[in-house]
Image (spheres, rainbow, N blue to C red):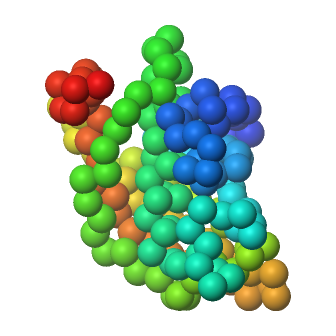
């Protein structure tokens, strides 16, 4: 992923998550097939448990970064953010158990495959920089489905 310096619109224009369920803070950079986003873990984080956010929540940070990339593509076609589905996760590997409050998360997603039928595969990496300066990485592959007409899949 080569940095392009591409400005990105507000996340509210790219993903359908709102309020506490919107985990990312901003898109840092993006290209045609990749995106980098950042998030801070705060005391108000939705998934905070006993002072930390469990590392398995990294899947959702990754999924929202994929959604932001898909939202950028929709925007380029003159459309708004659409509903997508996380179908599965493969090879989710984490070097740490949890994200401490005040950790900075950097999420990078790279399209590996996107079929015309809406099925896609994305290679994802999340780097957690903790307040004490330590860091660890999580990686995984997300399988997604973004139908042309989401109402066919769930009625809305």
Q: Nearer the viewer, residue 97 or 36?
A: 97
State the image quarter where residue 10 is shown. top right
State the image quarter where residue 150 is shown. top left
Residue 129's place in the image compared with 155, above or below, is: below
- The single residue placed furthest to the top in the displayed view is 78
Residue 97's place in the image compared with 149, above or below, is: below
Q: Position of residue 26 (x, y in %)?
A: 70, 46
Quarter of the picture holding the C terminus? top left
Side of 115 where 28 appears, left or right: right
> Do we see residue 40 in this rendering?
yes
Q: Residue at the spot x=60%, y=62% of the render?
A: 46
Residue 39's place in the image compared with 104, above or below, is: above
Side of 81 where 43 appears, left or right: right
State the image quarter where residue 132 is shown. bottom right
Side of 80 where 49 appears, left or right: right
Q: Nearer the viewer, residue 52 or 62?
A: 52
Residue 19's place in the image compared with 53, above or below, is: above
> Do we see residue 116 in this rendering?
no
Q: Position of residue 120 (x, y in %)?
A: 28, 45
Q: Residue at the spot x=22%, y=33% of the render?
A: 154
Q: Nearer the viewer, residue 36 or 144?
A: 144
- The single residue placed furthest to the right in the displayed view is 132
Q: Position of residue 39 (x, y in %)?
A: 69, 58
Q: Residue at the spot x=56%, y=68% of the render?
A: 47
Side of 86 where 133 appears, left or right: right
Q: Position of residue 32 (x, y in %)?
A: 50, 35
């Amino acid at each position: 992923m080569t940095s392009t310096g591409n400005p990105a619109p507000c996340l509210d224009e790219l993903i359908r998550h709102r309020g506490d369920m919107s985990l990312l803070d901003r898109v840092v950079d993006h290209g045609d097939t990749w995106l980098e986003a950042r998030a801070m873990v705060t005391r108000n984080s939705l998934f905070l448990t006993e002072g930390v956010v469990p590392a398995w929540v990294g899947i959702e940070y990754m999924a929202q970064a994929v959604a932001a990339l898909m939202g950028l593509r929709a925007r380029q076609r003159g459309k708004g953010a659409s509903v997508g589905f996380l179908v599965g996760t493969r090879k989710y590997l984490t070097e740490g158990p949890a994200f401490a409050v005040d950790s900075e998360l950097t999420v990078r997603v790279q399209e590996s495959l996107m079929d015309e039928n809406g099925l896609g595969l994305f290679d994802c990496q999340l780097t957690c920089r903790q307040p004490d300066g330590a860091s660890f990485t999580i990686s995984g592959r997300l399988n997604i489905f973004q139908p042309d007409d989401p109402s066919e899949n769930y009625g809305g």
